């Protein structure tokens, strides 16, 4: 009954101008397999999948389905051929209901072109029941949690009878528990005959669920790997050189607690408490990592410290000086270094040069300014030494910052913030969208700042990063502090805390459920390599 | 009628999902501002002082039936001052409720704004009529005239709805109306057939729209700029042709046969509603048809679902195999055709010849109606009616001899526009991709 489908990409090449995004890529997806494309950000995985899905036309090469060449002029053709795709950024209309989103493009109609959404609702309920998705066809998409939105995307593909499902970085937005659920769904889909192309750079998940792994680096296939290979081996293959995934980090040597947050509440314009009565302290020479699923108050917390939020109650003290109510400039001058979560929006001015971006916080102070005029020579000099120190890959400090790769942009932001004496360092998503090689470097710099005796606060939605850097881990959920736990707390406990369960309950739930977690193979797969 | 008037408005979109939409807005992090409660309070106080305390001692008389109606209703006679005080106290009550809602951080509901507006207009009418030399006015005539003046506005705002719902901002409504008016006049004059003129007006409007579509979709030129330039261009071209061609031979080129009023027997005799619904020109009837067809099309059909998806999230539509830019192109063109028909109203129904700038900025009022109507065809229809009402009121009130200087009354439609769009719209949400060109990849 189920039509399985063999998919082959042969010699796919895609150029954007002079940029070679895909270079003669060959991939065969056998029927009923989970085939992982492993590669760093910018390796060309998404480009390849957009070619397969008909969004881009390949410059060279062909796509074969069941050994017959096909050509797609648009996603419509790809869908008709049985290919479905769940994009990294969801392709859902927020103001539409689930049913409207699923119907879009494949509407069933009554006479006269009138929509027949009842038909779509029924299909959604069928699929939802079959895989235990628990999706209400009449809910508005913008009201749904991210995990459920992702299921809506999967339903969209399944309603169109997809035999091959492409999942592009599907776990980037999920909690560890939601990730485990997704991996279960993938296995279920596989056993019902759907092939899956799983795009990821997260080794733990790849190892847990893949049947075959193809590694892509700089637009080329560099080989295939076995899910049983060690994490380090996979990482080295992905990056192209030996990488150490574990950070050499001396134990923290916490001194006096110079940064204190007490009963901090941030009120959004609609009256919602986005940060709700949080208290914590950070000692000099210590890293506090704040974990939590995106949108649980992390952004507002950092903005409140920086003075970017309007309605803040409670107290934030640095070196016994109250920061609440101060201007951003005052806060920066108090010695706060800040790496914002979205470097391209808040961290850099893309059209300014790298050199100018490196002095954005001190352009008006000596030696960069003399009275009302700036000193370009000094700015250049500064750029030169920062670029060397932070290994920013660029030919000149005069180039626009926007031309740099994500990793190098992040190095520029980090270089700026770390190039003056700090009393507090805050980094939000310090390595988001940064290649593995640069991650190593950035992490080392953060630890070095700690070892100089600066209190450091890291905000990250990547649990791996939190576990790697933290001396203590704080978990936020719906603006509240669920708890602060020591470094070395288990991934499952942290995952439960990220869903709002208190540390004690999470620990006991984890003890009773650990057998089940092990048998799923997801929670401990990486542990061996990592420890 | 009032049910259809209010129900499509609050959600700004899908009538079927209004409660969810409102719940979502309440929690979606959009701020609840002091703007609306403060504005309502100020207007309430203004109404109380001017329309209430300073109201005239005369009794205002509102005629409801006309002599042509097949049954007669008695005229309403209300003491101006007492009525004004009563209405403004009701308004202050509503304003107080809005303030209460704000203190609870809850948004002001659409029904409240609408009720307030109706009360304010009633109080204003009472004050103006009560203070006039002859304190008597025909309500039926006032409303029927409002609809007539609203016709081009409704067509114009429907054009805007179609364009913005698909993601293209249409500032060129004025140019489309003017182009339609000119073409209708010249073609109907030459062919001596008003229906050919009507058709030609649609083509002219569509042609103006196509220029907008090509530049904004194909060449990614800023849509606002293209729209503004088109308005100037159409104004210049029609003005030039008017003075060179039309005025040279008025008989041949600028004496279009008009479209007559078609009266539906019996039904047209219903008081108030009869003249509005059943005593219209072909263009007037087309207006009602267009409002309903566009509304049903947008919210009940496959075409509408795709159109709205393209305007909200073009990339999502693209990945579902919908041709984004083609959808945009044809929708913008269709919008232009509709505005063109609206333009023909000026030269085929209202006046029997073309003059320079005959559209007189109504394209911009239509744009305001579209926003006040929250990008919804039915909302835009009632918003356009409100502007038509203001327009008609100022001319009638000048005739009955109000103490208010006529220059001030002439400002009324524009004052209503500013207040409506700036103050009373609240948190309306335009289509997310409106004004943003779509480039693949």
Image (cartoon, helix red, strand yellow):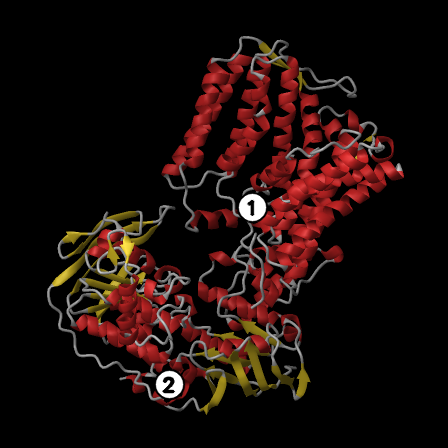
Residue A396 x %, y %: 36, 72
Chain of the residue under the numbered disc 1 shown in the image? B
Residue drawn 33% across the image and 59% down it: A299
Q: Is residue A509 visible?
A: no
Badge 2 is on which residue?
A235
Residue B306 x %, y %: 64, 58
Evaluate whether label 2 is on the same chain as label 1. Answer: no
Question: In terms of depth relative to the viewer, which is nearer, A423 or B70?
Answer: A423
* Above/below status of A130 relative to A346: below
Question: In terms of depth relative to the viewer, which is nearer, B14 or B404?
Answer: B404
Mark 2 or 1, closer to the camera: 2
Q: CA distance from mark 2 to mark 1?
A: 50 Å
Residue B333 x %, y %: 71, 51
Report the number of discs: 2
* Above/below status of B64 relative to A163: above
Chain of the residue under the numbered disc 2 shown in the image? A
Quadrant where the image shows the N terminus of chain A: bottom right
Q: Is residue B124 left or right of residue A453?
A: right
* Above/below status of B410 relative to A497: above
Q: Does dot 2 land on a helix, a strand or a loop?
A: helix
Badge 1 is on which residue?
B12
Question: In terms of depth relative to the viewer, which is nearer, A279 or B327?
Answer: B327
Local packing at callout 1 (Cα closer than 10 Å; few below 14, some 14-19, many 20+) is: many
Q: Does dot 1 land on a helix, a strand or a loop?
A: loop
């Amino acid at each position: 009954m189920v039509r399985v489908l063999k998919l082959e990409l042969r010699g796919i090449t895609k150029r954007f101008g002079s940029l070679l995004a895909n270079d003669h890529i060959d991939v065969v997806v056998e029927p009923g397999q989970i085939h992982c494309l492993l590669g760093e950000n910018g390796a060309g995985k998404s480009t390849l999948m957009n070619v397969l899905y008909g969004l881009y036309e390949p410059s060279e090469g062909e796509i074969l389905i069941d050994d017959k060449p096909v050509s797609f002029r648009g996603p419509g053709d790809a869908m008709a051929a049985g290919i479905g795709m769940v994009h990294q950024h969801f392709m859902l209309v927020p103001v539409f209901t689930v049913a409207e989103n699923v119907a879009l493009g494949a509407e069933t109609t009554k006479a006269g072109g009138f929509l027949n959404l009842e038909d779509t609702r029924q299909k959604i309920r069928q699929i939802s029941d079959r895989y235990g998705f628990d999706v209400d066809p009449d809910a508005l998409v913008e009201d749904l949690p991210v995990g459920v939105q992702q299921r809506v995307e999967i339903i969209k593909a399944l309603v169109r009878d997809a035999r091959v499902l492409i999942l592009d970085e599907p776990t980037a937005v999920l909690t560890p528990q939601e990730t485990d659920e997704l991996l279960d769904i993938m296995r279920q889909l596989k056993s019902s005959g759907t092939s899956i192309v799983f795009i990821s750079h997260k080794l733990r998940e790849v190892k847990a669920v893949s049947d075959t792994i193809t590694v892509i680096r700089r637009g080329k296939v560099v080989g295939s790997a076995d899910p049983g290979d060690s994490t380090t081996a996979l990482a080295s293959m992905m990056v192209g050189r030996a990488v150490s995934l574990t950070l050499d980090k001396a134990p923290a040597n916490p001194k006096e607690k110079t940064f204190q947050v007490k009963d901090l509440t941030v009120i959004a314009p609609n009256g919602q408490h986005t940060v709700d009565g949080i208290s914590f302290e950070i000692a000099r020479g210590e890293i506090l990592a704040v974990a939590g699923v995106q949108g649980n108050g992390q952004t507002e917390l950092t903005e409140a410290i920086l003075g970017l939020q309007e309605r803040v109650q409670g107290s934030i003290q640095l070196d016994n000086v109250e920061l609440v109510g101060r201007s951003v400039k005052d806060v920066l001058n108090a010695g706060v270094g800040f790496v914002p979560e979205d470097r391209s929006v808040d961290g850099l001015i893309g059209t300014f040069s790298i050199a100018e971006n490196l002095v954005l916080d001190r352009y008006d102070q000596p030696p960069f300014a003399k009275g009302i005029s700036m000193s370009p020579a000094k700015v250049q000099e500064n750029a030169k030494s920062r670029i060397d120190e932070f290994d920013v890959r660029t030919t000149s400090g005069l180039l626009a910052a926007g031309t740099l790769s994500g990793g190098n942009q992040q190095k520029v932001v980090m270089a700026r913030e770390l190039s003056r004496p700090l009393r507090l360092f805050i980094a939000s998503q310090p390595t988001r969208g940064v290649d593995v090689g640069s991650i190593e470097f950035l992490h080392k710099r953060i630890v070095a700042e700690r070892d100089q005796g600066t209190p450091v606060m890291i905000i990250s939605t990547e649990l791996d990063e939190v576990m790697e850097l933290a001396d203590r881990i704080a978990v936020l959920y719906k603006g509240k502090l669920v708890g602060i736990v020591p470094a070395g707390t288990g991934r499952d406990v942290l995952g439960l805390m990220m869903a709002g369960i208190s540390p004690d309950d999470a620990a006991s739930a984890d003890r009773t459920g650990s057998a089940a977690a092990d048998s799923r193979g997801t929670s401990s797969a990486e542990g061996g390599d990592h420890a | 009628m009032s049910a259809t008037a209010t129900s499509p408005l609050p959600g700004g979109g899908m009538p079927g999902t209004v409660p969810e939409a409102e719940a979502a807005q309440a929690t979606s992090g959009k701020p609840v501002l002091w703007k609306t409660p403060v504005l309502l309070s100020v207007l309430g106080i203004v109404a109380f002082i001017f329309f209430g305390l300073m109201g005239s001692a005369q009794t205002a008389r509102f005629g409801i039936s006309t002599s042509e109606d097949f049954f007669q209703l008695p005229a309403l006679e209300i003491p101006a001052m007492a009525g004004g005080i009563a209405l403004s106290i009701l308004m202050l009550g509503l304003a107080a409720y809005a303030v209460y809602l704000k203190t609870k951080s809850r948004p002001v509901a659409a029904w409240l704004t609408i009720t307030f507006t109706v009360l304010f207009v009633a109080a204003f009418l009472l004050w103006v009529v009560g203070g006039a030399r002859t304190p008597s006015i025909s309500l039926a005539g006032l409303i029927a005239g409002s609809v007539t003046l609203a016709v081009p506005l409704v067509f114009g705002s429907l054009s805007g709805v179609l364009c913005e719902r698909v993601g293209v901002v249409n500032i060129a409504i004025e140019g489309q109306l003017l182009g339609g008016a000119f073409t209708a006049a010249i073609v109907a004059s030459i062919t001596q057939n008003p229906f050919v003129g009507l058709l030609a007006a649609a083509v002219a409007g569509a042609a103006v729209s196509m220029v907008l579509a090509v530049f904004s979709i194909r060449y990614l030129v800023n849509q606002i700029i293209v729209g503004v330039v088109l308005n100037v261009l159409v104004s210049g071209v029609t003005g030039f042709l008017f003075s060179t061609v039309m005025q040279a031979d008025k008989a041949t080129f600028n004496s279009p046969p008009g479209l007559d009023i078609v009266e539906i027997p019996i039904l047209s005799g219903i008081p108030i509603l009869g003249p509005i619904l059943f005593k219209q020109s072909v263009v007037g009837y087309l207006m009602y048809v267009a409002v309903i067809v566009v509304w049903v099309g947008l919210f009940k059909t496959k075409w509408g679902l795709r159109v709205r998806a393209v305007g909200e999230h073009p990339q999502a539509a693209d990945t579902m195999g919908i041709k984004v830019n083609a959808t945009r192109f044809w929708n913008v063109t269709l919008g232009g055709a509709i505005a063109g028909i609206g333009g023909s109203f000026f030269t085929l129904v209202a006046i029997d010849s073309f003059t320079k700038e005959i559209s007189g900025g109504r394209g911009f009022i239509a744009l305001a109606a579209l926003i006040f109507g929250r990008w919804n065809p039915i909302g835009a229809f009632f918003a356009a009616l409100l502007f038509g009402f203001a327009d008609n009121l100022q001319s009638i009130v000048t005739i009955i001899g109000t103490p208010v200087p006529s220059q001030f009354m002439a400002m009324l439609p524009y004052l209503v526009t500013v207040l409506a769009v700036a103050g009373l719209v609240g948190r309306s949400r335009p289509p997310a991709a409106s004004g943003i060109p779509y480039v693949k990849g």
